[in-house]
Image: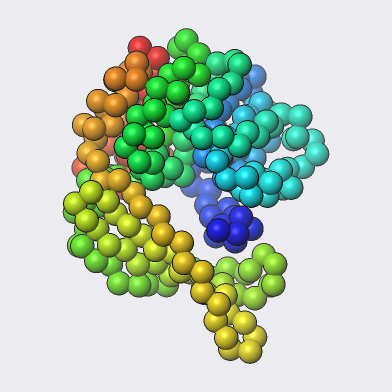
Amino acid sequence: MLPALYHAHHGEVMDDLPFWLDLAGSASRPVLELGCGTGRVLIPLAEAGHAVTGIDHDASMLAFLQSQLPEVLKPRVNLVQADMARFRLACPFPTIIMPCNTLSTLPTATRQATFINIKRHLAEGGVFAASLPNPQALADLPRIGEEEVETTFTHPLSGNPVQVSSAWQRTRQAFVIQWHYDHLHPDGSIERLTVTVSHSLDRLEVYTQEINQAGLKLSSLLGDFDHTSYTPDSPYLILIAQSS
């Protein structure tokens, strides 16, 4: 997907930023973000004074993020193209985060290897946190969601409107959402780009077991970014763990 288009769609989401900034703590604490994308969370962390390492497998996303970094922030930011299950960094981190619903998009084997790698890179007493759509809430939805318009924004290159709609299907194992980006040209033509994202419907118990097996200890379960305790009806599942 065109990184500039992705950023235009998701870059204005800010409701979770206070949560990640609070979790990162004082500005002297370095942060590792897994799946940093175009920097929606990474840049505010760097602006708050943190030294941030961002990992993403998509070179085009990282190139876009690098182009968006103000010069004053560049000394604080280290961008690494790597598989989050296999990367190796020299120093451990007191805070490792995985925002933006990334965790539930990982295949099971990749997710398990990622937890082990997180344990490897988490400093003693450090904190790991990940947010994902609540799998229980997704599993309770109907099997099919018809296409609906979500929002409209300005195309970052052409200046034309882009209408975003979504449709979804639910199986026993996954919630699969299709994002349709309709680029509306002045001559009336429509150029559609479709992006498909699959979220695992593995239950909380599966995540808990994998976290424990990786040598991490689950310390908190939240259901939103206001620190509300998790329930089966929560919009999110936010996992917070420490080295065991």
In the rendered view, tell whether residue 200 sits above or below residue 72.
below
Question: In screen coordinates, is 167 left or right of 22?
Answer: left
| Residue 101: x %, y % from top left | 41, 44
Which residue is drawn at the image coordinates 22% and 56% (left, top)?
171
Residue lying furthest right: 71
Residue lying furthest bottom: 187
| Residue 170: x %, y % from top left | 24, 58
| Residue 25: x %, y % from top left | 55, 23
Comparing 208 with 14, the one in front is: 208
For residue 85, say whether it is visible: yes
| Residue 95: x %, y % from top left | 51, 23
In the rendered view, tell whether residue 38 sits above or below residue 28.
below
User: Which of the 4 image quadrants contains residue 227?
Assistant: top left
Which residue is drawn at the image coordinates 45% and 23% (left, top)?
117
User: Which of the 4 image quadrants contains residue 82?
Assistant: top right
For residue 19, say whether it is visible: no
Q: Quadrant of the N terminus?
A: bottom right
> How is colour applied across the structure in the image?
rainbow
Q: Quadrant of the C terminus?
A: top left
In the rendered view, tell whether residue 2 sits above or below residue 98.
below
Question: In screen coordinates, is 129 left or right of 145?
Answer: right
In the rendered view, tell whether residue 226 sits above or below residue 173.
above
Which residue is drawn at the image coordinates 38% and 41% (left, top)?
106
Total tally of numbered discs in the picture: 0
User: Which of the 4 image quadrants contains residue 169?
Assistant: bottom left
